[in-house]
Image (cartoon, grey):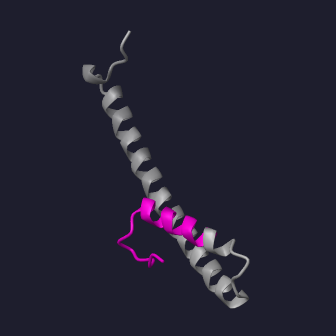
Amino acid sequence: MTKLNDKMDFEEAYAALREVVAQLEDPKNKIEDNIALYEKACRLVLFCRRKLDEAKMQITDINERIAQLKDSGDKIFEEEA
């Protein structure tokens, strides 16, 4: 099982989450094991949300900078006809 750490990227965390969900679906698991898996899944979900929020902020920042450049009259950013 993949260990959760701050060096993970979104794709690694998402793959780990899918792995945990698959393990949770195993009817042979003991309740104690499922509780630990559930906690790990919750942590992975929070981690993935944080990574997605960071990506959203980056995209918003890029879009704002592009809009400013476009508004400045730079012909590179004019719409093509």
Residue 10 in magenta stretch: yes
Expressed as whole percent of the image width and height from the top left, the position of residue 65 reads 34, 39
Q: Is residue 30 left or right of residue 17?
A: right
Residue at horizontal 49 percent and vertical 63 percent from the top: 15
Q: Which residues are magenta?
A: 1-21
Compared to residue 74, the image places residue 40 above or below, namely: below
Residue 19 lies in the magenta stretch:
yes
Residue closest to the eye, 60 or 74: 60
From the top left corner, tell me how far across and down residue 72 is, in percent. Answer: 30, 27
Q: Give the quadrant of residue 29.
A: bottom right
Q: Quadrant of the C terminus?
A: top left
Expressed as whole percent of the image width and height from the top left, the position of residue 41 reads: 59, 73
Report the residue at 62% width, 68% height from top: 22
Residue positioned 30% across, 31% down in the render:
69
* 54 is higher (above) or lower (below) than 25: above
Residue lying farthest to the front in this orientation: 28
Q: Nearer the viewer, residue 73 or 33?
A: 33
Q: Nearer the viewer, residue 81 or 46?
A: 46
Examine the rendered structure and indicate whether residue 81 appears above or below residue 8: above
